[in-house]
Image (tube, rainbow, N blue to C red):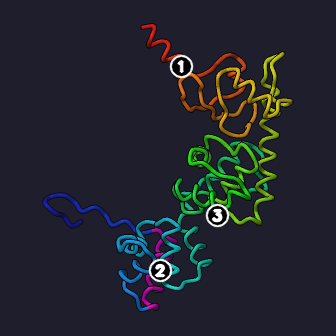
């Protein structure tokens, strides 16, 4: 093996075949269009470095950047997107098909995968996309988008589910299947909460938004979103300290309120 200054050179990593095919297709399309990298960068409104990365085959650039480059080179976007998805298939989150989703965990994984398939758009882009159709599907805050894509929570309502799918550019024709999957996951979660509830405790089955929000308000918490369910985290703001946090109605009913207020009280007592 060749050496430099007494140390062996690192072996050259062979690029992934699917990633190389995507990079080669972008490069060949640029040649056919008779464009330089600088010209493609100007048309796509991207940096020359991004064009170089896309054509190098060493890393997969985000879908939005790949799409802009493909449009600048007049490529078939359907074919390019298919190659782009295949190139990143090794790092996608494993999840069942949407028609086979039944549990909260499976739905959370599938929503994460939808975000990955879209090229992992930023929270800013997700919020912007959802806002463009907010009148029809409702808004999507960056906090909610972040928690859903990180699998911390699932959408608390159908409107939020649709807004998230819009933010991930999922085809609207697929919305009914996602809605059915969301309903199945929520139904199973509610059934599990009823089995786990202590005797005599409200389970959330007969608690609507008005009653649930009133119970939170009695504990000094102002809810900031639709009622997700008795055992699901619920975003609320503490009236005493103003802290924004996540609570479950089950814990609030058990007397567990704002932790921040308790810390402040302990500090003052000390």
Q: Residue furthest top?
A: 269
- Mark 2 vs 1: CB contact within 8 A: no
Dot label at residue 261:
1
Q: Badge 1 local density, few (<14 within 10 Å), some, or many (20+)?
A: some
Seen from the viewer's position, the closer of residues 136 and 79 is: 136
**Disc number lying in front (3 or 2):** 3
**Disc number lying in front (2 or 1):** 1
Asked whether, in this view, residue 146 is left or right of residue 206, the answer is left
What secondary structure prevails in the magenta region?
helix
Residue 17, image x, y percentages: 49, 72
117 in magenta: no
Tell me how far mark 2 sits from mark 1, CA to CA. 56 Å
Tell me how far mark 3 sits from mark 2, CA to CA. 22 Å
Label 2: element kind: helix
Kindly indicate the quadrant of the structure image that contains residue 76. Answer: bottom right
Residue 60, image x, y percentages: 47, 66
Q: Which residue is mark 3?
A: 169
Q: Which residue is mark 2?
A: 26
Asked whether, in this view, residue 19 is left or right of residue 240, the answer is left
Label 1: element kind: helix
22 in magenta: yes
The residue range painted magenta reads 16-33
Tell me how far mark 1 sits from mark 3, CA to CA. 40 Å
């Amino acid at each position: 093996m060749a050496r430099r200054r007494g140390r062996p050179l690192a072996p050259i990593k062979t690029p992934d075949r699917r990633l190389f095919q995507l990079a080669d297709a972008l490069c060949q399309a640029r040649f056919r269009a008779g464009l330089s990298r600088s010209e493609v960068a100007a048309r796509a409104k991207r940096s020359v470095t991004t064009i170089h990365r896309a054509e190098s085959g060493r890393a997969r650039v985000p879908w939005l950047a790949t799409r802009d480059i493909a449009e600048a080179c007049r490529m078939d976007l359907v074919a390019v997107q298919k190659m782009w998805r295949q190139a990143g298939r090794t790092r996608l989150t494993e999840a069942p098909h949407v028609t086979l989703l039944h549990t909260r965990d499976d739905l959370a994984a599938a929503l994460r995968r939808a975000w990955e398939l879209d090229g992992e758009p930023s929270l800013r882009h997700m919020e912007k996309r959802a806002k463009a159709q907010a009148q029809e599907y409702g808004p999507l805050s960056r906090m909610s988008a972040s928690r859903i894509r990180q699998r911390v929570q699932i959408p608390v309502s159908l409107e939020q589910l649709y807004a998230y799918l819009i933010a991930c550019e999922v085809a609207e024709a697929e919305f009914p299947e996602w809605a059915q999957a969301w309903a199945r996951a929520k139904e199973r979660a509610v059934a599990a909460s009823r089995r786990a509830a202590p005797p005599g405790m409200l389970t959330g089955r007969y608690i609507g938004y008005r009653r649930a929000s009133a119970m939170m308000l009695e504990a000094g918490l102002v809810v900031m979103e639709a009622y997700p369910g008795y055992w699901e985290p619920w975003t609320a703001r503490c009236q005493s300290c103003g802290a924004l946090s996540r609570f479950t109605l089950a814990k609030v009913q058990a007397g567990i309120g704002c932790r921040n207020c308790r810390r402040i009280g302990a500090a003052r007592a000390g």
